[in-house]
Amino acid sequence: MSRRNRLQVQCPTLRARRLRRRIEFFRGTLNSTSEVTEARIFDTTLRDGEQSPRTSFSYEDKREIAAVLDDMGTHVIEAGFPVNSDAEFEAVRDIAEATSTTTCGLARVVEKDVEAALDSGVELVHVFVSTSDVQLEDSMHATREQAKERAVQSVERVKEAGVECMFSPMDATRTDEAFLMEVVDAVSEAGTDWINIPDTCGVATPGRFRDMIAKVVDRTDARIDVHTHDDFGLAAANALSGYEAGAAQAQVSVNGIGERAGNAAYEEVVMALESLYDVDTGIDTTRITEISRTIEGKSDIPVPANKPVVGRNAFSHESGIHAAGVIENSDTFEPGVMTPEMVGAERELVLGKHTGQHSVRERLVDAGYEPTDEEVRAVTRRVKEYGAEKNRVTMQVLEEFAQDVGVDREVEEEEVRA
């Protein structure tokens, strides 16, 4: 029995309810959820994420983050670059010992890098070399043949040690296609378990990347992984197109942190897979908001309010029309297949310039008031005027407006009767 079928048997009511909702939601034009059948998550928050400018995780930070990612069911945690320093080596080693998931260490195609990764005790060694001419000539100062030879030697060394190997042709999306395929053939013959195709400089588009991944999938028996960057805001879309083309895994980072504009965001890719493709990733999505806030604090990179899935506005509503619909049925102006509860967040009706009477009534009733229609209209006018001056309408402010208007409060009446 497949893992997905086992989960359905273990929790038939929940899965049946989720599937019925999906079928109802996708009854319109977007009525297919069958493009992806397998989707593993490779988290690189502790490696590529930490490479964000002005970001550094302490040993304790790394251990704490890794523990949560492990508990969430993340398939691979890239813990760091073992050769980088003694402290980095120690962190990678200790994470490998402490976690139950697969821990990965990064290594250039250099002997000392590979040996450091092997010595750290990781279950997966990720070796990489540049393959684009611009990086070979102006960064590595090596020829194509030298790069290919070093790649093969590194893969062979990892496999000789009895450790799972992933190989990355860095800057694959700017590499001559014929040479890229040569390298894919060479490392496949050397026995690599995984080939990661990285869009190192974020220049891929979903359609082009899908075509590229499909060619690599057809070329090798190794499993395919993708690593996409967000320079043009396409990282998550490109990662998903990689899955559609047959990739088994995508590399992501929490909150999308990473080099330059960052990586495909863990939360966006996971929730798109779960909610839009109906793929059971095995990830405990209810901890997504928690891990997002943890990374925000430890990286000192603020999460924008409008950030998908984890931004504070992701499940917030101020517009009168939207709020009224959400009060009646949250599916009206939310995705429907993704709820705040699924990611460990809460829905919020925000009061301000665009607020309608439905939101004001809802908040007053929640606070124990019993407003009349006229009182709701009066309080709403005050809320709009106050919000138009760019003031934040807190519950304290709302209650002051209610008292000014003379709205009765149920709790106070009960106290009087007592």
Image: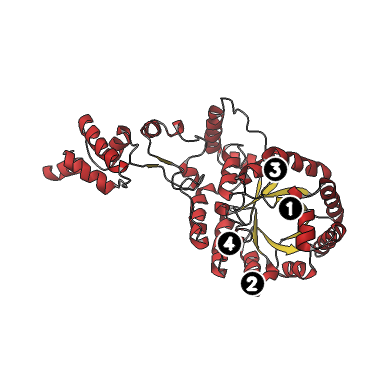
**Disc assigned to residue 113:** none
Rendering quarter of residue 65: bottom right
Distance between the alpha carbons at the discs numbered 3 and 2: 33 Å
Disc 3 is placed on an element classified as helix
Marks 1 and 4: in contact by CB < 8 Å?
A: no
Identify residue for label 2: 90
User: In the image, is 80 to the left or to the right of 310?
Assistant: right
Rendering quarter of residue 170: bottom right
Q: Residues within 10 Å of mark 2 (few under 14, many from 20)?
A: some
Q: Residue at x 55, y 40 (%)?
A: 11
Disc 4 is placed on an element classified as loop
In the rendering, at what x and y percent does residue 66 appear?
58, 61
| Disc number lying in front (3 or 2) | 3
User: In the image, is 251 to the left or to the right of 418?
Assistant: right
In the rendering, at what x and y percent does residue 157 appear?
82, 64
Q: Residues within 10 Å of mark 3 (few under 14, many from 20)?
A: many
Q: Nearer the viewer, residue 273 or 264?
A: 264
Distance between the alpha carbons at the discs numbered 1 and 2: 29 Å
In the rendering, at what x and y percent does residue 237 appear?
63, 42
- Amino acid carrying mark 3 in the image: Gly
Identify residue for label 3: 242
Q: Earlier in the sequence, mark 4 or mark 3?
A: 4
| Disc number lying in front (2 or 4) | 4
**Disc assigned to residue 53:** 4
User: In the image, is 384 to the left or to the right of 271?
Assistant: left
- Amino acid carrying mark 1 in the image: Asp
